[in-house]
């Protein structure tokens, strides 16, 4: 089942400082994906956090991926910049994603992060995300396309064109709020039937609760 993950720099501090850092992270992300059997559908590397949308083969695969990737990347940063201590927040945030109707919405949310942050005016102008592969067809060995993406067209050209069309309008504010709230509360993202299914399978109540006092949004 697809899972949306966000891992943030400690105290929202930067976790990427130079081009070499972005490249090193991607290299070790690729190795971690291969070693754990996870399928990565979308990602973005922002200055102080990372989003991943992936489907793990078993319940422990995500933890193995995060631990392996985090250990190697933190060692790289500490060695390169002669620093010590932690780099990431102690716990990553995650949210199960309903494939039908929500997975592509989540991909848009992830790949539009640099646009919402006013870093670029088009997701194609940002190097450190999956958009150029999903929207422009550039090769990216990190990615495995989900069935929801493959259903966008009969061939590659049709799928790319349909996917780009999704980005011609801004993401609905309510959809952004739903994704952020699901992440912040560790709840699934989907319709009521999907939430009921997850609740029965896990024995946990799956309901995104209304916000209390305002909180800093998950970007």
Image: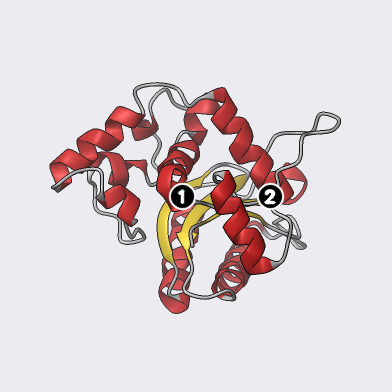
Residue 7 x, y percent position in the rendering? 63, 53
- Is residue 22 among the parts visible in the rendering? yes
What residue is at 63 percent from the left and 44 percent from the top?
Answer: 48
> Which one is nearer the viewer's eye here, 59 or 202?
202
The part of the image, by quadrant, that contains residue 179 is top right
- Of residue 168 and residue 83, the one placed in the foreground of this image is 168
Left or right of 27, for residue 15? right
Q: How far is the residue under mark 1 from the one under mark 2?
A: 16 Å
Residue 31 horizontal/vertical position (percent): 43, 72
The answer to whether residue 77 is seen in the rendering is: no
Whichever of labels 1 and 2 marks the residue nearer the N terminus, that label is 2
Q: Position of residue 98 (x, y in %)?
A: 49, 51
Q: Position of residue 114 (x, y in %)?
A: 49, 33
Asked if residue 123 lies left or right of residue 28, the reply is left
The chosen color scheme is secondary structure
The residue indicated by pointer 1 is 43
């Amino acid at each position: 089942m697809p899972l949306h993950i966000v891992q943030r720099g400690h105290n929202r501090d930067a976790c990427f400082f130079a081009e070499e850092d972005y490249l090193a992270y991607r290299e070790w992300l690729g190795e971690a994906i291969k070693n754990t059997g996870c399928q990565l559908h979308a990602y973005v590397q922002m200055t102080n956090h990372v989003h991943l949308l992936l489907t793990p083969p078993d319940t422990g695969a995500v933890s193995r991926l995060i631990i392996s990737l985090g250990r190697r990347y933190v060692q790289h940063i500490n060695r390169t910049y002669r620093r010590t201590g932690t780099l990431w927040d102690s716990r990553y945030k995650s949210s199960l994603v309903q494939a039908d109707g929500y997975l592509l919405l989540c991909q848009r949310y992830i790949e539009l992060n640099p646009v919402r942050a006013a870093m670029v005016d088009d997701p194609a102008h940002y190097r450190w995300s999956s958009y150029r592969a999903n929207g422009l067809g550039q090769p990216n060995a990190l990615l495995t396309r989900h069935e929801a993406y493959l259903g966008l067209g009969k061939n590659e050209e049709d799928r790319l064109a349909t996917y780009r069309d999704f980005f011609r309008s801004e993401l609905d504010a309510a959809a952004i709020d739903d994704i952020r709230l699901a992440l912040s509360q560790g709840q699934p993202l989907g319709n009521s039937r999907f939430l009921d299914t997850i609740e029965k399978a896990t024995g946990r109540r799956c309901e995104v609760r209304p916000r209390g006092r305002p909180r800093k949004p998950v970007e």
